[in-house]
Image (spheres, rainbow, N blue to C red):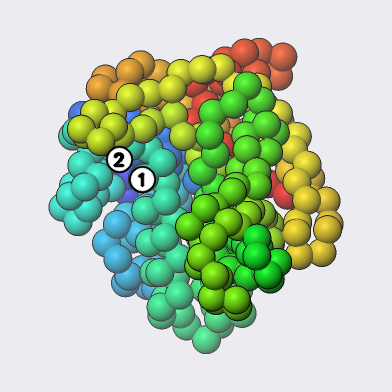
Amino acid sequence: MENSCRHEEISHDWKDYGLSTLRNMGSSCYINSAFQCIAHTIPLVEYLLKIPSSSLVGHPVINHFIQLLKGFWNGNWTITPKSFTTTMENHVPHLNPYSQEDSSECIMFLLDLLNETLSTLSLPYSQVSIIRREIVSDLFQGSYQRETQCGSCMSRTHIFTPFMCIELPVNTQLTGSFDIFSEVERLTEYHCESCQIKGDATTQLELWKLPEILVVILKRFTISPEGYISKDSRSILIETNLQLTQKSDGRVTNYQLYAINCHVGTAEQGHYYSIVLNTDDRWWLFNDEKRSSVKDERLSGIIRSTAYVLFFKRS
């Protein structure tokens, strides 16, 4: 059944759906695949669907995004998202739906814009206690700690930086990518503020605070000094269940994979699609207006060389 992108009221049984597909509006596969991942982030969706129409006075892209989301969860349709892609074209020139763009950039742009827009959302008094304006940062924001130790006086400095996603190198196994992320690096030209000596030091980046929703971007694309883009298509074992340790208190956090944004092809010419765990506890592959179920035992093989952006939820 086909449905236009229009604002819809949501029924109480909206979680029975989640299988809507999106038509490609030119080269909008990167937008469609990004949307599918965000649309299956259920803790976020639960809040966005509660926002009344009268409060949608923020950024036009977010207004149309939420309209599309409500249409998506109001049935299992084939949706033509013309209003959303046209709004993207008009307001976000660097993410043009009619040219090939990057899905990870689209995902982070939408999350950042959602965070910014919801923080200033105008709500009636009756909705203030229901809608959490800070829902995006509550779910997605964690923080890094970079610890640097001077090789001369052994003093340590700590710098804390918030993040909404983690970028990891491609490794044979995802846990190995996290190990590389936290490897100790040696510095040779470090200027120590404590002893004022310029010399050797060590530095290490660690996960200080882990978020509720962990977004991992695999560094499959690199740009050479001459401006050429290349793709790393090596296979990587993606664990559907992940354990990470939070540096702040040593707590081990268990994560479950629920969405994978995939890329096939080369850096110059490729295609994006997504595989998500729907509310029916089944994996589904969404390829623009097409969808198909994916058996658990086939998932790892499908995403080994195509996985690009991974979404994990705290379990």
Q: How many marks?
A: 2
**To which residue does mark 2 refer?**
81
Q: Closer to the camera, 200 or 21? A: 200
Residue 276, percent from left and from top? 58, 32
- Where residue 264 appears, x then y in whole percent? 40, 18
At label 1, the amino acid type is Cys
Q: Which mark is residue 106?
A: 1
- Residue 209 tag number: none
Indicate the secondary structure of the residue bearing disc 1. helix
Q: Is residue 128 above or below residue 89?
A: below
Indicate the amino acid at tag 2: Pro
Given the current orientation, which residue lies at the most extreme bottom position? Answer: 125
Indicate left or right for 151 with 305 as reference: right
Which of the two residues, 183 or 41, is positioned nearer the viewer here? 183
Specify whether residue 111 is in view: yes
Give the answer, above or below, for where 34 lies relative to 138: above
The residue shown at (33%, 49%) is 6
Horizontal and vertical percent for residue 51? 48, 66
| Few, some or many residues within 10 Å of mark 1 (<14, 14–19, 20+) | many
